[in-house]
Image (tube, coloured by chain):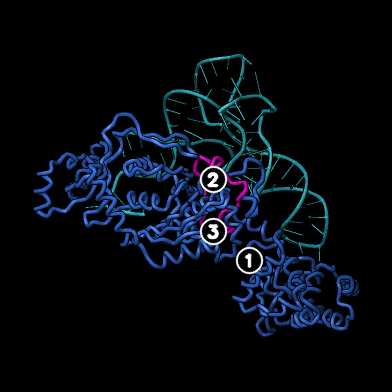
Amino acid sequence: MTETRLRFPPSPTGYLHIGGARTALYNWLFARQTGGKLILRIEDTDTGRSTQESIQGILDGLEWLGIDFDEGPYFQTDFAEEHTATAQKLVEEGLAYKCFCTKEVLDTKRETALAAKKPLGYDRTCRNLTAAEIAVKEQEDNPYVIRFKIPERTGTAGYNDKILGRIESDYKEIDDFVIVRSNGKPLYLLCNVTDDIRDKITHIIRGQDHMTNTIKQVLLYEALKAPLPVFAHMPLTLDTKKAKISKRSHGEIVAVQFYRDHGFIPWALNNFLALLGWSAGDDKEIFSKEELIKEFSLERINKSSSIFNYHKNDPKFFTDPKAISINEHYLRTMDITELGSMIQIELKKENLWDEKYGNEKKEWYHNTLNLIRDRFHTLKDFTSLGRAYFADDFVVEEKPLKKNILKHEGLKQWLPVLADKYEQLENFNLEETERVVRELADKLEIKPGIIINGMRTAVTGQLAGPSMFDILVTIGQKRVVDRLKNIGRLYPPPDEQ
RNA sequence: GUCCCCAUCGUCUAGUCAGGUCCAGGACAUCGGCCUUUCACGCCGACAACACCGGUUCGAAUCCGGUUGGGGACGCCA
């Protein structure tokens, strides 16, 4: 059994989007499962649109996702000579031919055909030029492209798709496609096959939008006398209006980078992407990396396209709810040390990181994350909603300010009183902090909830959160006392009332 | 227009190849309840789908044909 060799060949004309990431993921999973190799090949033959930033963006995106490759990145343009030589060989063997039809003429023909609702393919004008005719045109310096000569056969060409089954197409439906531009630059269909043959690719997992390319490429493999790889055409990802997702129409929401910048856990995104078009066959939906590598299979990839359920301007969900839900799942179940490292990065970005969190305050750090993680959706929430646990410059949100503080004028006096009592407490623990609050409420003849919720907002800035007394103990005596004493700052100055 | 692919809850899907165990299971979302000083988490429950028509069969989500719908391709882009 020969080693499996897979490739991910992005064209660097934009950022890595979730469709591309999913393709990369499936290839990666299959390579890892079979102990094979994954090759990264940058298909940059469209020099007009390829950019360096795009290459970097793709590399960064893959690295963030943890999709590592074994060879590459190779750059397709580095193999231009080989591509041209291959085309030349095909011409010499009579398997391809020079076509002198100009782009203008072909464009006109295409438009006419479209208007007349006729097939759009090339009419093969130059296919049967004699050697003499070709010589004349070449002498006149007419520019030409090289077209592949679809074999003169009846019946169908085809291949066995690992996902879709047998795919066939009638020979007469297949166009004599261009393999070399008039400027001498070889084109995708040829480059791609030439590279896959050289890189000894055994499995090609790509989107269903390549199906018609594959028919043509199968013929190219035959002409180049190379063995056919296994093809697997995965379903496309569409938007809620069933249009193909693209940078152009969807913007950053489909960029992998967006998820990194919005506090997604890389593996959570992989897990979500894996489920978009594949399932294990049972009810299992959460997979560790090892589990997914083990259980993934080409046969279980769906045939039908799936919808990325994202609604623009949805106030509750900034992206597909299932993606968020999977992210939340990892957030609250993952190993606390691992989560700690991820949050460390976030805290550092916000200048909230304290080296003690890695040493003498490590236990406190982990306990705190554990206390607050259940309510959060992304890694970013730890430094925004959870800011009060790490710093004093947290924001007091407007809604709780009104509801929990301003509504009860008395808190302005009560909370400092409570602060004094807390300051004198020898054991600042769950039982004592609660006892003090209840005694105070009793004495003042008010509901404990008023003090508790007022305190919640004064101490964390939030409307809701973990159990109040857990919060107090976590944030610590000194900080709590200071924040309670400072309650007056939350009320408007008297002269402005 | 031509060719190709696809079709189960709002979304992701199980079940289709080997027809009966499926008046269709799970997850997310939504709604309700429990828990709770808050909000979540968690737990319990509800809502919700076999695109349509015909055929084969004792029996069809499952097989066959057609219709409709959706998607893709039809570049000197990749």
Q: Amino acid at mark 1?
A: Leu
Q: Can you tell which mark lies on residue A277?
A: 2
Residue at 42%, 35% in the rendered image: A167
The residues bearing labels 3 and 1 have C-alpha atoms spaced at a distance of: 21 Å
Q: Is residue A80 left or right of residue A283?
A: left
Left or right: A199, with A356 as reference point:
left
Badge number at residue A379: 1
Between discs 2 and 3, the one toward the N terminus: 3
The C terminus of chain A, quarter of image: bottom right
Distance from disc 2 to disc 3, alpha carbons, whole Å, reads: 18 Å
| Residue type pointed to by label 3 | Ile
Residue A145's tag is: none
Q: Is residue A306 magenta?
A: yes
**Relative to A16, residue A451 above or below:** below
Q: Main secondary structure of the magenta part?
A: loop
Q: What residue is disc 3 on?
A: A67
**Can residue A252 be found in the magenta stretch?**
no
Which chain is home to disc 1? A
Relative to residue A419, is residue B30 drawn left or right? left
> Which chain is displayed in cyan in the rendered image?
B
Q: Which residues are magenta?
A: A293-322
